[in-house]
Structures are given as structure tokens and as C-alpha cells.
Image (cartoon, coloured by chain):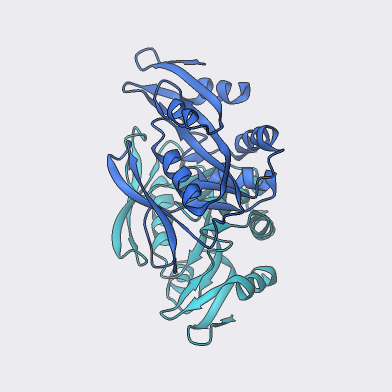
Chain colours: A blue, B cyan
Amino acid sequence: MQYLEDKIRKEGKVYPGDILKVDSFLNHQMDISAFRKMAQEFKRLFGDENITKILTIEASGIGLACITGEEFGVPVLFAKKSKTKNIAGDVYKTTVKSYTHGILSDIIVSKEYLLPDDRILIIDDFLANGAALGGLIDLVGQAGATLVGAGIAVEKAFQPGGEMIRARGVRVESLARIKSMDGESGTIEFC
Amino acid sequence: MQYLEDKIRKEGKVYPGDILKVDSFLNHQMDISAFRKMAQEFKRLFGDENITKILTIEASGIGLACITGEEFGVPVLFAKKSKTKNIAGDVYKTTVKSYTHGILSDIIVSKEYLLPDDRILIIDDFLANGAALGGLIDLVGQAGATLVGAGIAVEKAFQPGGEMIRARGVRVESLARIKSMDGESGTIEFC
């Protein structure tokens, strides 16, 4: 998506260690007009798929998922990173490794809201190692719901997550796919 | 707001220990058409205040904050619960006690995005003990920004947070204010 690539080039900052900082518009401060354009693109890509629900994971996927849910006219469900006393009853649970924080954490969704007849579109802001996306796919499988695909804002295509998950037959649509980044010069090359 | 009170009466579940579960539409599964109506109400209440930015806290405030940000046409900033390596540079930081999880955690926002000339509207899904809201107000103060007020979806008015924060002169507008709940009969009384 040219719009998003341009925005990443203009506002993103590249640091050594393959770190891309896009927190001016995507995952700390959020530019909702950009989210709307991205959501419309997800609607164009998945609009014929009879999506019944959007699934994401806290925290930084929630905003984009909500705007996307409004485009599709369906509810949005976010997986929570730990069990709190505010969720009663049974949950689907899986374990996800965060490469950013270096920890394992359980993610859960309530069985009440992820149903066997749901047709699920997963939305997330980033795809790199694929840990979060893999966990969400696992939850969809546990529920016996249909996974239609995943819509991602930014994919680090030089990391293994996207390839690994596409190899499992999952349709993954990333709006910007980064081929390489150079932390010294600050340049970004897209696929 | 009659619409939200009706929705809580219809979809909310009350459990002993003053627990209100509204995760069918507010803070796990999210009904974006309901968020839109709530955001329009926040716009009606604060529309003349020249808001420049919405501030919320991860995770469950983010969706409502994003829809509200779109109503106001301003960016949305969410405070993060711990410092990750993806945020470089200086941050404002404060400590918040979570009554749900029983832990203390640091919340941070980047100094880059919370500015002295910002006019801030805080949005959150719940107000009970006021810990999260108090922390966000502290961050706004550290930045030297102007706090216009706080828009809350559901306030447990029988808990001390709302009164405490209004006593500090902060304008707090809660769309549904719960006077009392009965975990035995499952009934809810609004203010």
C-alpha cells in the first residue's frame, strides 16, 4: 500500500538491531485517519469473505482492529495477555513468546465470544517473528472457527514469521512489507 | 447516557464483589457501533474545548479512545504499562496501582507526543478507584499540557475514584454512573 509505505518513509525511524519506530502514528501515538485508510484497504482485500468477527491482541493492535471492525460492521475481540478476575468462565488459552520483552505470556479469549461458526479476520500492527499471530491462529483453531486470513499493517519480511505462517496455508495480507532496513543510514527498502 | 445504561442493563452481568462484566461489548469483545455513539456523546460534551489530543491507557481504553479521536479529528496517544525497547528517548513516567491485578506498574508516555501546548481529553472505559485516571492526569501535568477533562464509559460511583478526582477540579463526564449493584439479584442501579 503506497500510502503506508510513504508514511513509514516519512515518519518512521530506523535504529540498529532492525528496530523500526513508527510510534508517531501506529503503536503509541495513533493517527486515526491513517487507520481509516488502512481499514478500507483491508475491506477491499477481504470484503467478499463474509467476515463475522475481527480478532486482535492487546495492546497496539486494538486501535486498527476497531477501525477495521467498523468498516466490516462486525464486533472486534482482543486476546488478553493474562487472566484477570474480570473474565469469568472458560477461556481458550495459548502461550506466546514476546521477542520485544523477552518473556513468555499466556494469551486468552473467552469461549463466549470466539465461536465455531465465526469467520475470523485477524488484524495486527506488526508481523516479524510471527509469535503473536501464531498464538491468535491457535486460538481460532481451538474454537473451531474459520480463519479467513490476517491483515497486518507492517511486516518485517526479512524475519521469518510471514513466510512461516503463509507456508501453513494462511492468507496473510501486509500493507507494507519491509525487505531490509539500515540502522546506520536510516533507510528502508520495501518488497 | 440512556443508550449505555440500557446496554449495560441488557448485556452486563453483575457478580458478587462489585464486579460488573461488560466484556460482551466494552472491554474484551467490542461493539464498535456502541463506541461510535459514545464517542459522539463525548464530542457533544467536549466539542467546544479545542481538544488537540486524546490520551488513554492500554489496553481496554484504546478502542473507545480511537473512535473518539476520529470524532474530534485528533491523534490518540496511549500510555504504555512498561518500558519496551521500541520506545527510544525520554518518557514521562508514573506509577499506578491496579486493583484488578493487585500490582504496581509504571506507565509511560513519550515526551515527543505529549506536549506543553496540548489540550488533552482523557478517555477510558472504567472509573472505579481512580488509579489509572490519576496516573494519566499526573502524566499530563508532567508535560505541562492542559487537561480539559476526562470522558469515561462506566463509572462505579460507589467507589471513591470519581469523587476524589472531581474534588481536584477535574471535569469528569461518565456516560453511565452506577450507584449500586447487587451480585445476588444481578441488578444495577444508576445515579
Q: Is residue B41 left or right of residue A171?
A: right
Nearer to the camera, A181 or B169 = A181
Image quadrant holding the C terminus of chain B, namely bottom right
The residue shown at (58%, 26%) is A4
Q: Position of residue A30 (x, y in %)?
A: 53, 39
Asked whether B168 or A3 is in front, the reply is: A3
Residue B119 screen position, x and y as percent: 54, 48
Is any atom of residue B51 visible in this view? no
Residue A38 location, x and y as percent? Answer: 62, 34
Q: Residue furthest bottom?
A: B185
Closer-to-camera residue (B23/A170): A170
The correct choice, above or below, for B69 with respect to B125 in the image is: above
Residue at coordinates 48% horizontally, 83% vertically from top-left?
Answer: B183
- Quadrant where the N terminus of chain B lies? bottom right
Residue B98 in percent (x, y) is at 35, 63
**In screen coordinates, is A64 left or right of B136?**
right
Position of A139 relative to B38 (above/below): above
User: In which image quadrant can residue A127 be found?
Assistant: top left
The one of B43 and A164 positioned closer to us in this rendering: A164
Q: How many marks?
A: 0
Q: Residue furthest top?
A: A185
In the picture, measured across the screen, residue B61 lies left or right of residue B88, that is right
Whether residue B155 sits left or right of residue B82 in the image: it is: right
Q: Is residue A105 visible?
A: yes
Q: Residue furthest right?
A: A48
Above/below status of A88 relative to A45: below
